[in-house]
Image (tube, rainbow, N blue to C red):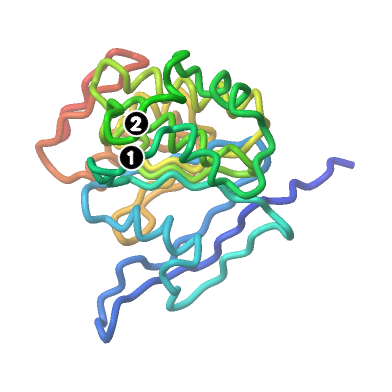
Amino acid sequence: MKKEKSPLLSVKDLSVSFGNSTIPVLKNISFDVNTHEALAIVGPNGSGKSVLLKTLLGAIPRSAGIIAWKENINIGYLPQRFQVDHYLPMTVKEFLSLKQLPRYSLQEIAELVKAKTDWLGKNLAHLSGGELQKTLLAWAIFDKPDILLFDEPTENVDVANQESIYALLHQLQDTLGVALVIVSHDIGIVYRYADNVLCLNHDMLCYGNPKETLTAKTLTDLYGTHTLIHDHQSHKNYDIH
């Protein structure tokens, strides 16, 4: 008999509203994330993607539905934006040393995120976008989480380094055996790395395997008319009318 999967995260009919608004920010969202799986969340700006992540983490209360995390799960999170005070005299090493229960040495964590030898000694305020993302990623994986949540992990990274960040996340998924939940705007990345995709525009417009789910019609429903989306895997452009 085939053994049923035990999800790390199971979400059923989740809805979120702010204040006394009768219009929900999120409505009837349902999905599972299993061990070692990667879920991508896609949708236009303002569709509720960041709200969903923050609701999963308990930072925003849900209005209805169920969020069920596996018992004793360890969660890592990388926010979309992390502002660093340019007068803050703190190095990467000092920042990571604030972690209370690290499971790696600083050298091990530097190797895991493929940072250069001088990275640990750099001031946080002087890091490039890619170096800062690696610092936040190091923080997120320092205590060996079971699942990692990333909100636009390449938001502040130049185009040349965006692919390397996603490749690093995929490698860490294999190396550490973690599940991933990634908010992304890059459809090619979703095709290449995600096991499942959740299409979100306040309502859940689709959920399933990217190659089967992200049809031209789905993308039209999701992003609206006159949208050009590039699939980096097939090198095709979807011109949505």
Q: CA distance from mark 2 to mark 1?
A: 7 Å
Answer with left or right where residue 17 lies relative to residue 241: right
* Residue drawn at the location 50% of the way across and 17% of the way down: 114
User: Decide: marks 2, 1 in contact (CB < 8 A)?
Assistant: yes
Q: Which mark is residue 123?
A: 2
Q: Residue at x 42, y 26 (%)?
A: 191
Secondary structure under badge 2? loop
Residue at (74, 46) in percent of width and height:
5
Q: Amino acid at mark 2?
A: Asn
Quadrant (top left/top right/bottom left/bottom right) for the C terminus: top left
Q: Is residue 30 left or right of residue 126?
A: right
Residue pointed to by mark 1 = 89
Q: Residues within 10 Å of mark 2 (few under 14, many from 20)?
A: some
When asked about the image quadrant of residue 233, the answer is: top left
Of residue 7 and residue 174, the one placed in the foreground of this image is 174
Q: Quadrant of residue 16?
A: bottom left
The residue furthest bottom is: 20
Residue 18 rendering spot, x and y as whole percentages: 30, 77
Q: Earlier in the sequence, mark 2 or mark 1?
A: 1
User: Where is residue 147 shown, x and y percent of the image?
Assistant: 60, 44
In the depicted view, which residue is nearer to us: 104 or 121? 121
* Tag nearer the camera, 2 or 1: 1
Instruction: Look at the picture and state if 76 lies above or below 229.
Output: below
Q: Is residue 80 left or right of residue 210?
A: left
- Expressed as whole percent of the image width and height from the top left, the position of residue 166 reads 42, 25
Residue in view at x 40 percent, y 48 percent: 206
Report crowding for label 1: few under 14, some 14 to 19, many 20 or more residues within 10 A (C-alpha): few
